[in-house]
Amino acid sequence: MRSRTTLADVAKRAGVNVSTVSRSLNQETSGQVSKATVNKIRKIAEEMSYSPNTVARGLRTRKSMTIGVIVPDLTNPIFPPIVRGVDSVLFSRGYSALVVNTDNNAEIENALFDSLMERQVDGLIIATGHTERSMITKYHNQGVKAVLVNREASGVPYPSVIGDDAAGITAALEHLAKLGHKKVLHLAGPTILSTASVRSNAFTNTAKHLGMSTKIIKATALSVSAGEIAMNKFLEANPKSVTAVLAGNDLLALGVFHALRKHGLRAPQDISVIGFNNMPFSEDFSPSLTTVSAPHFEMGVESARLLINQIEGKVTSPRKITLPVTLVVRESSGPVPKR
Amino acid sequence: MRSRTTLADVAKRAGVNVSTVSRSLNQETSGQVSKATVNKIRKIAEEMSYSPNTVARGLRTRKSMTIGVIVPDLTNPIFPPIVRGVDSVLFSRGYSALVVNTDNNAEIENALFDSLMERQVDGLIIATGHTERSMITKYHNQGVKAVLVNREASGVPYPSVIGDDAAGITAALEHLAKLGHKKVLHLAGPTILSTASVRSNAFTNTAKHLGMSTKIIKATALSVSAGEIAMNKFLEANPKSVTAVLAGNDLLALGVFHALRKHGLRAPQDISVIGFNNMPFSEDFSPSLTTVSAPHFEMGVESARLLINQIEGKVTSPRKITLPVTLVVRESSGPVPKR
DNA sequence: CTTAATCGTGCAATCGATTGCAGGCTTTAT
DNA sequence: ATAAAGCCTGCAATCGATTGCACGATTAAG
């Protein structure tokens, strides 16, 4: 890389001290310099196409203007929209995002955290979903600024942004009830993940309230293959014991599709399937997936706003933002099959 | 953020100069310090949980250990795997990735480039696909180290990593030929995007070689909706004039599905459809999509390797790496319909 | 017309690391 | 025993910005 023009270069050409150049170029301090000088210097800086060295500035100001974004896995399609939402806010405020993937591995998460700290990030947006809170507590003890997104965060000292999972589950179950379903299976994610446990609890409560007969099975991960394995096992043990499946997220629902196909069953004719998230392309699955749509982009936006407010010491922002979700009815859910 | 322990803190506790601490902690320079001192200092640093300030180091060494990754849009599912491939290499070598989205907008790309330069990135991985080369030339003139990925790069002064698009198109067309198709439509992306033009040319050449009768239409973007619009228009103007469609990528193919459905046509019974990329979930579409699988993760890996070699002045690496692709046959392609 | 307040600019320290150079001490060779 | 060489370590400059303080010049007040 060629070396870029520095404040000193501009100062020399303008015949002034670097401090004057610095003050002229910065919005907040340019009032300390005469208008004539400011104009002259701005013009020269422009000509020399000066642009500040964020690294040097960060050293002095103790602000790197970068934010760490911790996700489990960027290839899970719900995270790119969140990241883009985050990014849209950060960029407009002069920040950049350093996105890292933990693969839900605590060891990796630790290493990544250290790496982010060494890079002097100004704050963290945490989208990993462990209910286990020791990591979060550790961050907080180190005085790290952070916001949690897409994960329940009770008893945790950080603000959070979540979708209204309970309302989503309720809407889905009411939809099933209206279609006549009485026996519903919940394919939950691992309860170590907070979204999984929240949705699972909501399922239990609402189903009881609606007078449904329920079963719950757990997948070992929020992935297609884990969903398929769990559903296969269920279908082998309890054929035809339920008329609908509510999956913990869309990936699990996709696993359910695979398992149904393997057992010669069709959705929704034999069994209705509902997912959660309305991830990209869920309308293009076979059948198109009825699911609860969560506003991932907006969640990213709100979490970034919350974090920046926290960093810049603005207004005390709300501790928790819950964004509304909506049920999207598609082909995979239908009336109870007639025997 | 609480202030962290610095070299000076460790030095004071150890009763030595910061320079000795610095040399002791760095692999390459620890030979200059006596073993006894190194051990003592390492122990103390450990106790004080010292970790280096990357910003300060970067200022002095003129290396930020961060890489800019420029993609059009992270929510396009082919990019997350590329980014994760890049990341896997970067992280193991101590680098971090700053991922930015251009939305194929030159103005935004310019602003992002400036922002990356201000952050002193050590290099760029460029996954945006404009055939227009002025931006690239500008980067090169500024002495920026870079690698191109997933885009043709002839006449450009940077190494590149691409999938073997021409071979993929050939495999797809040969597959169609074997199924008896003689009249094939190519739904190309905008030719301003390099992958689109490469695939389009390969289509023309191979189809001629196979003696097929061809038509080509262009979508205005590599998106589902653009594909749908273009295909709708085609179906209205030329109903039943082809028996197969080769789309420029999977998103366009999905658009084709939508258009077919709208016109009451089914794949593959009425018309065969083939995509390109084998993006995540393309096997779950309705029907599952026959497509050319490109090794996106590996492309990310190789591009990161190429870039780091370039940065660290290692072996002269090859100017161009072409990775093999494979045709994945699924439900959306079948024999020519009998009339 | 003097004194005080204000304005504009420069000096120099600072952020936390890295690194060339110098010098004291030890070791080796003659 | 003495000179040469090598080994450790410290000093201080440096990377490129920001910012408290000081000082001379200008303006306002009395």
Image (cartoon, coloured by chain):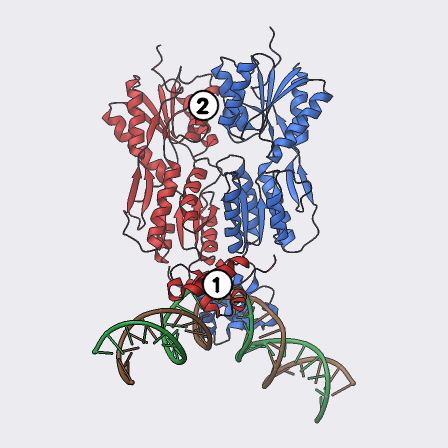
Chain colours: A blue, B red, C green, D brown
Residue A51 in view (yes/no): no
Few, some or many C-alpha atoms within 10 Å of disc 2 (few <14, some 14-19, many ≥20)? many
Residue C23 versus residue A194 in the image, above or below:
below
Query: Looking at this view, is B160 or A105 the one in front?
Result: A105
Q: CA distance from mark 1 to mark 2?
A: 65 Å
- Give the number of callouts: 2
Type of the residue with mark 1:
Ile
* Any part of residue A271 in sight: yes
Residue D9 locus on image (x, y percent): 44, 71
Mark 2 is on which residue type?
Phe
- Kindly identify which chain the residue marked by label 1 belongs to: B
- Dot 2 corresponds to which residue? B257
Disc 1 on helix, strand or loop? helix
Query: Where, quadrant-wise, is the N terminus of chain B in this rendering?
Result: bottom right
Q: Nearer the viewer, residue B218 or B97?
A: B97
**Tag 1 and tag 2 share a subunit:** yes
Q: x%, y% of residue A244?
A: 60, 17
* Residue at x 53%, y 22% (from the top left corner): A230
Q: Is residue A59 left or right of residue B234?
A: right
> On residue B41, which mark appears?
1
